[in-house]
Image (cartoon, rainbow, N blue to C red):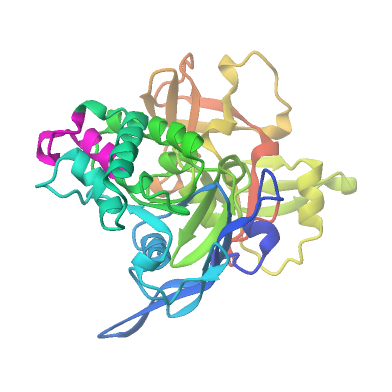
Amino acid sequence: MSDSVQGDDSRLDERTGDQTREVSLELDGLTKVFQDDEGDVVAVDDVSMDIYDGEFVVLVGPSGCGKTTTLRMIAGLEDPTDGRIVLGGRDVAGLEPRERDVAMVFQNYALYPHKTVAENLEFPLQIRHYPSDERKSQVESVSELLGISDLLDRRPGDLSGGQQQRVALGRAIIRDPEVFLFDEPLSNLDAKLRIEMRTELNKLHDRVGKTSVYVTHDQEEAMTLSDRVAVMNDGELQQIAPPQTVYDRPANLFVASFIGEPPMNFFDVELSPVQSDAGLRIVSDVFDLLLPEAMARKLDSWDGSTDNLVFGVRPEDVTDTTVADETFPPETTFDAYVAVVEPIGADKDLTLAPDADAPEEREFTVRVDADTEAREGDVITLAVDMAKTHVFDDETGTNLTL
């Protein structure tokens, strides 16, 4: 099954904001093929995207999806097999890293251990032969911006992980590049510090306003930092859009399954016309639900190229009717067996199944209010917010209800 929608721009690339902004960075058919003992390995496959001036774009996907290789090609650390990298209006694909107007922040910080913080910050200006007084002025300005003015005389070994990361950011900022590149810069920090640094990065980007490309495997990081998220898998760009759009309107099965925690539930289904042409029902061995009119119209125009349809619904878009303050149309409800109850503070995650004897692979998850009275072994009635559901073509992965 192929989940790529590379050729369908209407599904792939949804933009927001001021469309009069200039394109700062353009990737055009970017491809990278490595050779190993078994032959060609395609790490990045015909990736194209425009990144606007001042935009923060996050490349996200599982390990081995091609996101870091894409970033390294932008930086000049890898040569593309094919395609163009246009930065500030010029094709830089053949240029050395030092000839590109980019600054990269690495996962391991890459600080000089024998230099003080001030010397680390100053070094990019020193090798460009900036005057001493200008170097000092810029070090003071950047260190104040990052809140590390009191650390200037220390060496990296005397700093915490978060402090080292600030120094690495400062060394990139002081160069005043056209584009910042971030390669999983927060992955070495503990969970609490990662959240704090995400907030700081957001504030920093607002202040500096530079075009940024950021790589992570952490979807929460991607969703909270980005103006747009570029989801990758198997070297291909699956979807690029604002974070909420990627969440609400995933282009295909891969995006729907990767974005969201807990992940979206999927069910093999069939379509069944309602008598007297009153709509379409979506039917599985778990439920029989009526599709909203707008979704039914989109599926009416579907060419029926496959009999294999997949119905997707996020865990938080299902309600435990026993604790709700409203009534639900019966055509949006179904019963399920409670296999596991997991309290998670303000909510509870319920692992459900069609019945007590259902195998584990037929279980699914819903996130409900902590007030639920559901207990393991109960059969409860659930209501689905049908307007937030999706139907996918299992063979192509395409979301048929966009």
Q: Residue at x 31, y 27 (%)?
A: 147
- Any part of residue 16 in sight: yes
Q: Quadrant of residue 174?
A: top left
Q: Quadrant of residue 351?
A: top left
Is 315 drawn above or below residue 302 in the view shown?
A: above
List x then y, in percent, for residue 259.
Answer: 49, 46
Q: Residue at x 11, y 47 (%)?
A: 113
Q: Quadrant of residue 292?
A: top right
List x then y, in percent, for residue 209.
Answer: 51, 41
Q: What secondary structure characterizes most of the magenta part?
A: helix
List x then y, in percent, for residue 178.
Answer: 48, 54
Q: Is residue 202 left or right of residue 134?
A: right
Residue 334 painted magenta: no
Q: How many marks?
A: 0
Is 268 drawn above or below residue 3 in the view shown?
A: above
Report the front residue among 262 and 129: 129
- Any part of residue 353 in sight: no
Residue 168 painted magenta: yes
Query: Magenta span covers which residues?
Result: 151-170
Extreme residue toward the right, this view: 276
